Image (spheres, rainbow, N blue to C red):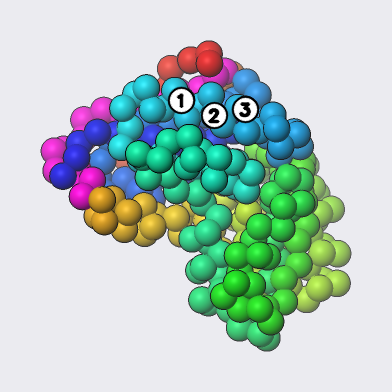
Amino acid sequence: MNNRPIGFFDSGLGGLTCIPHLMKALPEEKIIYFGDTARTPYGSKAVSTIKSFSIEIADFLVKQDVKMIVIACNTVSATSLEDLRHRFPQIPIIGIIEPAAVKTAAVSDNYNKIGIIGTKVTIKSEIYEKQIKKLNPEQKIFSAACPAFVPLIEEGIIDNDIMNMTIKYYLDDFINNNTIDTLVLGCTHYPLIRKNIEKIYPDLKIIDPSEIVIPTIVEQLELNNLIADVPNYENMFYASDLSENFMNMIDRIFENSGLKVKFKSFDL
């Protein structure tokens, strides 16, 4: 057993979509979260920049004595996972992409048309295609970058025509031309617009890596004898910029979770 915290990080608030799922599965675990809201979005930045930012954040989490690091960001998972594992071999580090790829392959067959949406960097890496086709080489997979989603979500522009028009701009032709029936939300921000997508495209099967990663976290905690056995009384949440829009989005993410979340500003 181990009562040290689990470290989560993301380029912004998107990674927070993982937290309610984890706390439902393991309510005694303590969380330390860092959202790099001052430098978001990562998805259009150079890979070298993303790696540099990721190392800074992981260094911060290691100094907080975390027992595990969860990269709650598809862009960072696509670019920096192996670098971070090499830098911190003593700490289990979990990326969000592999569990989602395994799940996608498990619930799909050669008749399905899988769509992957994500940031420019994630889509360019083709990491979802590579991971899924390791398990099913014949799987039909199509990808589309949707770079405007993250900044709109970070600004809280969700329940309105602007977001819906943006969704249709990116996805109408992509879904129709490729007859997509299964859509992977390849960015942890995207669960915040899942209801929008489901309303516009009601026949799509949606795969949400923010939820799918949780069994992998539980499995690794158990495997390494790291499950907490003391009730958790305090999680710590940090952000590099606490804007008003950001704080409003926090309330939205956690409104039905029963969790009380307080953020502290921390400049790396």
Q: Name the amino acid, label 3.
A: Ser
Q: CA distance from mark 3 to mark 1?
A: 11 Å
Question: Is residue 199 among the parts visible in the rendering?
Answer: no
**Residue 180 placement: quadrant:** bottom right
Q: Can residue 236 be found in the magenta stretch?
A: yes
Using the image, determine if residue 105 lies above or below residue 126: below
Q: Main secondary structure of the magenta part?
A: loop
Q: Is the Cβ of the residue at disc 2 closer than 8 Å to that at disc 3?
A: yes
Q: Secondary structure at mark 2?
A: helix
Q: Position of residue 230 (x, y in %)?
A: 13, 38
The residue segment tinted magenta is: 225-242
Q: Can you identify the residue that label 2 sits on?
A: 55
Taking 55 as reference, is 263 left or right? left
Q: Is the Cβ of the residue at disc 2 closer than 8 Å to that at disc 1?
A: yes
Q: CA distance from mark 2 to mark 3?
A: 5 Å
Q: Secondary structure at mark 1?
A: helix
Residue 59's disc number: 1
